[in-house]
Image (cartoon, coloured by chain):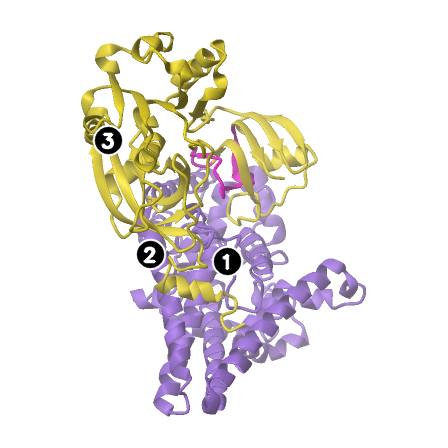
Chain colours: A yellow, B purple
Amino acid sequence: MVTTPLLPSDYLDLVSPLRAGADLRGRIEAVHPETGDAATIVIRPGRGWRGHTAGQYVRIGVDVDGVRLWRAYSLTSPTNRQDGRVTITVKAIPDGKVSNHLVRRAKPGTLIQLDQPTGDFVLPQAKPAKVLYLTAGSGITPVMGMLRDTEFDDVVMVHSAPQAQDVIFRNELHDLVADKKLRLTELHTDTDGVLDITRLAELVPDWAERETWACGPAGLLDAAEKHWSEHGVQERLHTERFRPGIVVAGDGGEVTFSATGKTVDADGATPLLDVGEEAGVLMPSGCRMGICFGCVTPLKAGAVRDLRTGEITEAEPGVLIQTCVSAAAGPCDIER
Amino acid sequence: MTAIDPTAHLTAEQIEELGRELDAIRDEVIADRGEKDAAYIRKVISAQRKLELVSRGVLLFSIFPPAWLIGTAGLSVAKIMDNMEIGHNILHGQWDWMRDPKIHSTTWEWDHVSPSEQWKHSHNELHHTYTNVIGKDNDLGYGIMRVDEDQRWHPFHLGQPLWNFLNACFFEYGIAAYDLELGKNLRKRRRKNPEFRARAKAVGRKIRKQVLKDYVIHPLLSGPSFLPTLAATFTANLVRNIWTHSVIMCGHFPEGVQVFERRSIKGETRGQWYLRQMMGSANISGSKAMHFMTGNLSHQIEHHLFPDLPSNRYAEVAVKVRALFEKYELEYVTGPLPKQVFSAWHKVFRLSLPNKKPKVKTPDREQELVAA
């Protein structure tokens, strides 16, 4: 009542955005380069942070060019870090808006949005006798969180990267090897070629006896899943996939109105508002020319094209589209 | 609808070309929209909140006249910022592209007795789509005033200078009543319409909250400064109301602004829609501070052409828009605030009296469209 129509928290956010009870946020405190295109971001999470388990990931919301974008990154810090900070390690992927921003432009002091950590790519309570980490590229990040967190008696890692200088955490891995805490096989795919999973036994003869955590490109994980199940040991393999679905923007597609359960085909030129009304879906509408924002509706999946600018918008949590000036750019799901 | 159509010299092709040129201006801003703009609105929101906090803090001691003056002035400015540069523009979806759920047209609520949802319907949807179309755009005189010679005169209009003055003092209530279409809905039968009742309840809730905050809780918190604080919040609301009313009157009422007949917008093209916005709006000239305090509605013409572009961009857009006005030999109605306010009030007074029907009838736009 004292602050209507705002909430007291709107004012408290001005002075203490990381306090207990605030929406969960974090502050970037440092950015450490790891390789030419990867960096570790040190984040002080807000008081509401519940802590993570090694191997889990966190979704973060970063403002890139003024637009809030959400991505998931593995936590690479151990769970018992004394200073309360956590780290994520990000590899800049070509055309990756968020990853390039974090690696090359993020500044200490910046506030970011956080979700609680999540994911079931984690170590079991009971320590397995033998462990294999099978990783490639930035797939090493959740595994690094595990390596830093829990010591095992017998750990082997097979890691692939294009060249030696592309190996994220290379120095730390070699230190672990020197301390005899890790046996490491480093494959450089530019010279050695991509790992042929059927020849894994040459590198790790007892692979089938090892509890295995694998993370990397889909090709590697598909091959691993096939290989493990062919040998009847699939229960020993744990995999983590980044970005399961990649949206390919096309021209028109199948539109699902998930709240009403209707699905119709739409072309790439008809506004989704018309498509919905044609299908008998109750669509909110207004000016029908993109100025009044009376028709905004959540885009749950897929991609749409702005008929005025041609701009593509992909589904992400919290993305709303103006249905009167947006057309399907491939299959999409509209919450109506 | 004025005696001479000021756009009569334009061909249909020229109007469409004008539309394309305006689209290009819009696209340029959108392509360039980014971090700086986001930082701008965040800074304004944060400044508004701090100003309001400090002002209300000062008012706790408003028993001392200097504290009363400073606190009242600060709170008035904070309330104006909340309604104008922040509320109006966020509710237009100008900042939706940031995807920040806290600064979004679907979640924003303002310090105003009309709930955002209702205001967005009557303002964004009706007023901005049907700008200055008599019978469709009730912002023309808010249904209580006669603002064009062609509107039928009624003895009720004799009092319109007084209605307008009262509307200015209690503008937020006027807007709430207007968004509710109170006049129409209070007639028999409509009163019981459940949708109307729900909306009226929502307005009631907002009024109750604002009254409690401004006229009960904060004065009580001030203890011995109860009465001065009460007077201060009342004054701040009054100042905000008169200021916003004045700014908004300048947007469409000054002399030189065109109004349109209902049938003239049938089958309107994008170019014609743009042209109507250009001819139906008026600007206020002045300093940066003036533009800021009007919520950049001093760039009413640009706002009506591009209601969803971030308000901090209107100033740069205005240069290009004005060049188009010159190119197409159209009148860009603008002037300093006192002049525009006087002009609008002059019209209110003039049209409170009956007038003769204009002798020269405008050629019918609809027929022109058919011919084109």
On the same chain, marks 2 and 3? The answer is: no
| Residue identified by numbered label 2 | B40
Give the magenta part as a residue range: A308-329
Q: In which quarter of the image is residue A37?
A: top left
In front of the other: A292 or B219: B219
Q: Where is residue B20 in the image (x, y as percent from the top left)?
A: 41, 39
| Residue identified by numbered label 3 | A169
Mark 2 falls on what kind of element? helix
Residue type at the position of mark 2 = Tyr
Chain under callout 1 = B
Mark 1 falls on what kind of element? loop
Whether label 2 touches label 1, CB < 8 Å: no
Alpha-carbon span between mark 3 and mark 1: 45 Å
Give the residue drawn at x 53%, y 68%.
B112
Residue type at the position of mark 1 = Trp
Q: Is residue B276 highlighted in magenta?
A: no
Image quadrant in which the N terminus of chain A is located: bottom right
Above or below, B309 relative to B204: above
Q: Position of residue B202 (x, y in %)?
A: 64, 64
Residue type at the position of mark 3 = Phe
Mark 3 falls on what kind of element? loop
Can residue B155 be seen by looking at this rendering? Answer: yes
